[in-house]
Amino acid sequence: MEERMRWPTTGVTTERPDGADAPGGGPDAHGELAFFTDDGAHQRLTVSHREEVPAPDREPLRAGRLVLGTGWKVVQYRLPREARDDHRARDRLEREVGAGLAVSRAYRGAPYARLFPRLAGYHLDTEEPFVFYRSSRGTPLAGLAGRVDVRDQRTIMGDLVLAVRLLEAVGIVHRGITPHGVLWDGERVRLPEPYTATRAGLPREPLGAAPWAGPEQREGRGEADPRDDLWSVAQVMYHLLTGRPGSASGPHRDLAGRPALAVLADAFAPRAADRPRPAEVLRMLNRPDPLEERPLPPDPLEADRRAFDDELARKRRALGLAPAADGDGYGNGYGNRDGGGYGGGDADDDGFGPRVRRGWFGGRGRRR
């Protein structure tokens, strides 16, 4: 059965969040927050509590813990008005929203949806653009290094590889998988929010720290590849098993003596092209690939979306604006899929016809 958001039942209206009442991306004078849901619906909830919290690695964005409606706890990231001229930060926030929506809409209701943070709301066409997620429970893997039993090691490894495989299927490279961001709740892992995500095949930009990011990613060489994330998984698992960081340039010298990491041995290759595909590693782990029998259908609007990206990029050039980061347009490929993208227009009308909602793991799309 398809998972549905359990919205609080008080303090909710369905007015269009045009930003007029809440120019700062926070609660307006009436203590309400207007936003789009991951379904593209317009919502407005009362804000009963707001607490600023640190936002490490996400500057200049600011983070806050919010309680909405009748007790719905979320974590919000917003671009403050004093940083509104930071086009790089704006572009990255747009890509984050796009990646979150792509994952949510492809795998909603799937048993593996819990591998990803749940994007619950966003608003990009406001003075302080923002995104927020449902609060996640779990312990960062960095705090468990050297203390996880063999059974849990296998589960964590399989979940991480599966998550990379599922991201690959929707054309996303996460680029932010580290032991400090991945959570473990005793049953399943959860990836960090996709705030560094990009589209597979776009030029790499220098990003990430050793050893969690591979050499090509750190140096900004070549094109983003899902196997960039597989390198990160291998390094996270090495740290989890040993309590130490691995080698930043390739396999650690003691890797041969660690049979638990044998299936990831080739994932430590310095070049993405020399690493296995995520589906291959799943087979070696005897984990089923849920997309093997039911692949995601091709996006029927992909050509139009790319044309939309190209046209917006042309307009940016004509206006003398800097190109979007990673060479991506405001549409971000996956960013405007299924409506509700940049511009804050009707979420069901992106200019390319009816929206298609996909069922999880290749379930038949349903035109609404």
Image (cartoon, rainbow, N blue to C red):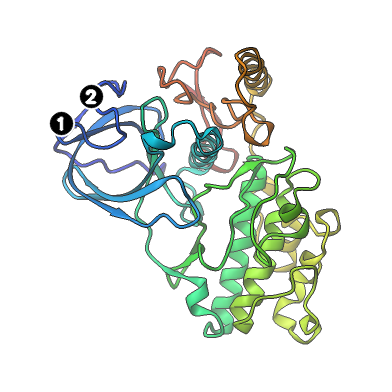
Residue 152 image offset from top left, x and y in percent: 54, 77
Q: Nearer the viewer, residue 280 or 205?
A: 205
- CB-based contact (under 8 Å), mark 2 and mark 1: yes
Q: Looking at this rendering, what residue extends furthest in the right direction?
A: 274
Residue 210 image offset from top left, x and y in percent: 68, 65
Residue 257 image offset from top left, x and y in percent: 78, 87
Residue 345's place in the image compared with 287, above or below, is above
Residue 297 image offset from top left, x and y in percent: 65, 33
Q: Amino acid at mark 1?
A: Ala
Q: Nearer the viewer, residue 265 or 221?
A: 221
The residue wearing badge 1 is 29
Residue 366's place in the image compared with 3, above or below, is above
The residue wearing badge 2 is 21
Which residue sits at x=66%, y=43%? Answer: 169
Q: Amino acid at mark 2?
A: Asp
Q: Quadrant of residue 242?
A: bottom right
Q: Quick one: label 2 or label 1, which is nearer the N terminus?
A: 2
Residue 329 visible in the picture: yes
